[in-house]
Image: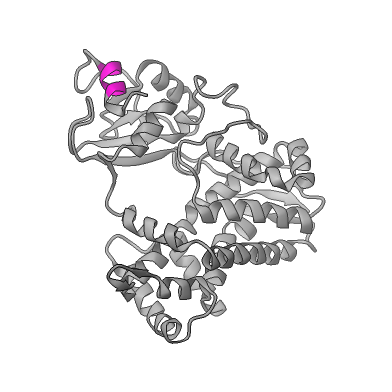
């Protein structure tokens, strides 16, 4: 297997540092897929003057770029060590608490829609399920759900103001869990230890902030796209009703075809082939997931595709929300189907998942 440097040097040999010709991502507003095809075919690695970033669009190259230690996450995307600590914490009792919280929250939200003839799954289910799950899993006060929802939707801010507010909110709760631990995720984080001893309060706050970040808009977007894909393919949805064990594959297929984020940015900390140190690299998940050299009939949604292989796997919370959310909806709303009316038209390259998803229940 070639390393990323080998691939990029081979494909860009003889080209200038900033090759002219390709259209910019700035031109890809409502339909980026023709641009993606052009990039994959003619410009697999190219500098985009319009956005100030190197574009990588082929499936294999995107996978390699996301795994390359020379290409690091940008400041504000969350420290990778926080993600690793959270991954280590989400095992055993913590994973059980998170799974139970997702399942319970999904059924509560789905049952609220059961007596209605019509509902909007984005506003009334997708937007709230990640927040409700985080509140339940962490054992936070139910009456604080609206404030937690604001943090999930708007983030904690790069300036640190939101993180300070979260720290002040968690301080008394963290002290209580350290003195009297329970079975919730916050207790698990407070009891976690490293070689230096228990995690300090600011580390616990950072881990909770990371979890709330994953419970935010990205998860809601991914869930909305997933449900829209299934509602657009009712026969596949009926199979999943009878075979819920196939839901994880259907979720992976939705991430492949309609990722919540089409672009993931990285910064080169040293030269990588033709990419100079300090450059911004745009990994185009939206292009990689529809690469015909990797996927047969890549524009088609197939919940039972043998190997959907998304370039970037979804977060644990998002996967649990998809699996338990769909199960709860199909149980509470046996007649679930799309309501008639105009379909969502994407606003731009970033906001592509449906903003509304009207359904008949």
Can residue 227 be seen from the camera position used here? yes
* Residue 196 is a magenta residue: no
Rendering quarter of residue 312: top left
With 84 as the anchor, is 247 left or right in this view? right
Please give the count of numbered marks on the rendered protein: 0
Please name the colour scheme applied to the rendered image: one colour
**Farthest residue in the top direction?**
14
* Residue 62 screen position, x and y as percent: 39, 32
Quadrant (top left, top right, bottom left, bottom right) of the C terminus: bottom right
Q: What residue lies at 49% left-to-right and 33% top-to-bottom?
A: 30
Q: What residue lies at 65% left-to-right and 48% top-to-bottom?
A: 357
- Viewer-closest of 228 and 30: 228
- Viewer-closest of 320 and 93: 93
- Viewer-closest of 114 and 172: 172
With 305 as the anchor, is 203 left or right in this view? left
- Residue 89 position (above or below residue 201): above
* Residue 172 screen position, x and y as percent: 40, 84
* Residue 263 screen position, x and y as percent: 40, 38
- Viewer-closest of 183 and 332: 183
Over which residues does the magenta segment extend? 6-12
**Farthest residue in the front direction?**
195
- Residue 361 position (above or below residue 253): below
Classified by dominant secondary structure, the portion drawn in magenta counts as: helix
- Residue 329 position (above or below residue 71): below
Quadrant (top left, top right, bottom left, bottom right) of the N terminus: top left
Q: What residue lies at 80% left-to-right and 63% top-to-bottom?
A: 115
Can residue 342 be seen from the camera position used here? no
Q: What residue lies at 65% left-to-right and 39% top-to-bottom?
A: 229
Rendering quarter of residue 258: top right
* Residue 57 screen position, x and y as percent: 40, 27
């Amino acid at each position: 297997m070639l390393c990323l440097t080998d691939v990029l040097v081979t494909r860009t040999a003889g080209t200038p540092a900033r090759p002219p010709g390709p259209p910019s991502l700035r031109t890809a507003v409502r339909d980026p897929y023709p641009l993606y095809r052009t990039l994959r075919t003619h410009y697999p690695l190219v500098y985009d003057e319009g956005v100030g970033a190197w574009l990588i669009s082929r499936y294999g190259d995107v996978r390699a770029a996301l795994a390359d230690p020379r290409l690091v996450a940008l400041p504000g995307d969350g420290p990778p060590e926080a993600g690793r600590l959270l991954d280590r914490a989400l095992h055993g009792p913590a994973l059980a608490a998170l799974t139970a919280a997702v399942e319970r929250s999904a059924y509560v939200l789905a049952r609220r829609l059961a007596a209605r003839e019509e509902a909007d799954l984005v506003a009334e289910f997708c937007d709230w399920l990640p927040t409700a799950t985080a509140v339940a899993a962490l054992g936070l006060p139910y009456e604080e759900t609206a404030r937690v929802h604001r943090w999930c939707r708007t983030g904690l801010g790069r300036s640190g103001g939101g993180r300070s507010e979260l720290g002040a909110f968690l301080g008394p709760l963290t002290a209580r869990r350290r003195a009297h631990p329970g079975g919730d995720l916050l207790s698990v984080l407070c009891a976690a230890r490293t070689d230096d001893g228990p995690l300090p309060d600011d580390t616990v706050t950072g881990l909770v902030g990371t979890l709330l970040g994953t419970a935010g808009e990205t998860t809601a977007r991914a869930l909305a796209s997933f449900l829209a894909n299934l509602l657009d393919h009712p026969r596949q949805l009926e199979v999943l009703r009878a075979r819920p064990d196939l839901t994880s594959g259907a979720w992976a297929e939705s991430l492949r075809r309609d990722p919540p984020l089409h672009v993931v940015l990285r910064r080169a900390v040293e030269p990588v082939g033709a990419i100079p140190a300090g450059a911004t690299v745009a990994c185009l998940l939206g292009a990689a997931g529809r690469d015909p050299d990797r996927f047969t009939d890549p524009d088609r949604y197939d919940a039972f595709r043998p190997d959907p292989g998304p370039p970037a796997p979804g977060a644990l919370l998002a996967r649990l929300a998809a699996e338990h959310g769909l199960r709860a909806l199909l149980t509470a709303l046996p007649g679930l189907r799309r309501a008639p009316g105009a379909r969502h038209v994407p606003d731009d390259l970033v906001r592509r998942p449906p903003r509304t998803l009207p359904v008949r229940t």
